[in-house]
Amino acid sequence: MNTQEKKTKVRGVSVRHVNFAIMALSVLLYAALLAVSFQAAREYTDMKAATDLYISCQENAALVTAGSDYLTEQVRMFTFTLKPEYMENYFHEIHVDRRRELALEHLSSQAGDTAREYLSRALERSNQLTELEIYAMRLAAEGKGLTDLPQEVEETELFPGHKELADAEKIDLARDKVFGDEYQARKALINDNVSAFINDVMSTTHFRQETAMSDLNRAMATQRVACSLLLLLNILIFIMITFLIVKPLKVYIKCIKEDRRMEITGAYEFKYLALTYNDIYELNAVNEVLRRHQAELDPLTGILSRGAFEQVKDMTRLKPRPIALLLIDADVSGQVSSGYGYETGDKVLKKVARMLNEHFRASDFPARTGGDEFAVIVDEVEPEKQSSILQKMHDINRQLSRPRDGLPAVSISAGGAFSPNGFTEELYRKASAALYEARRGGRGGCRFYDDDMKPDTKRP
């Protein structure tokens, strides 16, 4: 499709239609927002109920532990000090405060079958432990000779063998019963059952809490998305004209300042304008490429021209780096032109240029600097690579001396030098001196500058 056809098919956006569409979507989103809000309220209620249940389980679990530990502490203190107030505290907890029992009853109402089984075992063993504690208090009270005992202690009968014990032995036995290994084992067994029960209830409650929280998060996320979309659509109603006209103008001004193609955006008129501008821009770009190509490349060989080579030298001066400079002469190109004609001579020069391009890297810069004179700037190279460069020149000479394309055999001579800081006049003089020595040695020679050579006094 050509440009004219593209311009014919350009379609603009109808502001009125977009307005109607945005308003309709706003109504739909508002209705969806209301529905999601009601759902979020329900999920919040469920999550709060699960959270309250979770907190209640934690609190009652703490009460179970606190009540059990309190009873153990009071019975031990009584058997150790034989003070009646500890026994009174014990039965006050049993009959009045009842923290352990009330907490277990509350937990039981929230438990499943497995948890209730653990609770039943814990209650049964707790009652057995209570009987042991009351028996120990009876022993201690007998040993101390206390009277006016609580009913449970008063009604507890000692075993016949224990009745015959001395008072001190009864007290020691009472202490052993609440401090001994058997007591600790029973208490640990009760705690294990209570812990298993609480873990089961807490796990179920935590799952309900996480499920409610997950549902609430999804509802809230949906609500946030709906609110964002509703806000966006309402804003678009007021900025639509600006978006279709003002913004494209700013984009086009930026494109002109940055000298690049215009983006096809905005209303119909702006799209048509952008296509027309791009036609002119592309035509100018093609002309510029052609002009630069003609200026930078040698028209005969297709490698860099002398002018472009000068620019490369300047570039290495601005950003110093290690390079090598090769100055190259096609030894007999004049004789070829005289003997075979200028057309054949031109073909030989093209062949030399092509081989330089093929044997050196894409990052290097081969150029034609005169009639049969060439040069190469080898970029980012150290003197250690001298043998590699000499091998390249040897390979080129070998191929030129054994042509298979019907052209006469030729050779090239080259002189080179290295510089750690880009192109300098000293580098050029050293490469010239090396070329001079190479030509003195015969056709097809290649030398790199060394300290025995005298630098050429010519300016580059």
Image (cartoon, rainbow, N blue to C red):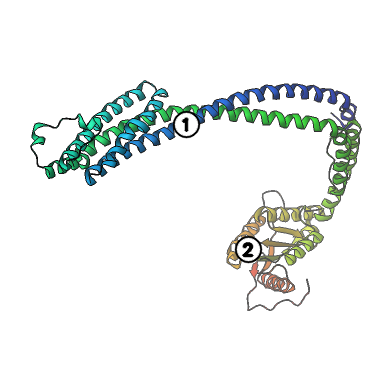
* Residue 402 seen in render: no
Q: In terms of secondary structure, where does tag 1 sit?
A: helix
x, y percent for residue 74: 29, 41
Residue 112 position in % (x across, y down) = 39, 22
The x and y percentages for residue 398 are 63, 57
Residue drawn 86% across the image and 34% down it: 244
Q: Is residue 59 left or right of residue 416?
A: left
Q: Which mark is residue 54?
A: 1
Q: Are marks 2 and 1 in contact (CB under 8 Å)?
A: no
Identify the amino acid type marked 1: Tyr
Q: Secondary structure at mark 2?
A: loop
**Image height check: is 261 above or below 237?**
below
Q: Quadrant of residue 31?
A: top right
First-in-chain label (2 vs 1): 1
In this rendering, position of residue 335 left or right of residue 102: right
Q: Tell me if I can see residue 19 in this picture.
A: yes
Observer-nearest of 364 and 439: 364
The C terminus lies in quadrant = bottom right
Q: Is residue 450 above or below residue 370?
A: below
Horizontal and vertical percent for residue 319? 72, 64
Type of amino acid at the residue the image marks with label 2: Val
**Quadrant of the image containing the N terminus:** top right
Image point (12%, 42%), residue name: 167
- Asked where in the image residue 219 lies, by quadrant, the reply is top right
Task: Return the residue at label 2.
Answer: 381
Mark pair 2, 1: CA separation: 74 Å
Residue at image location 81% in from the left, 24% down from the top: 23
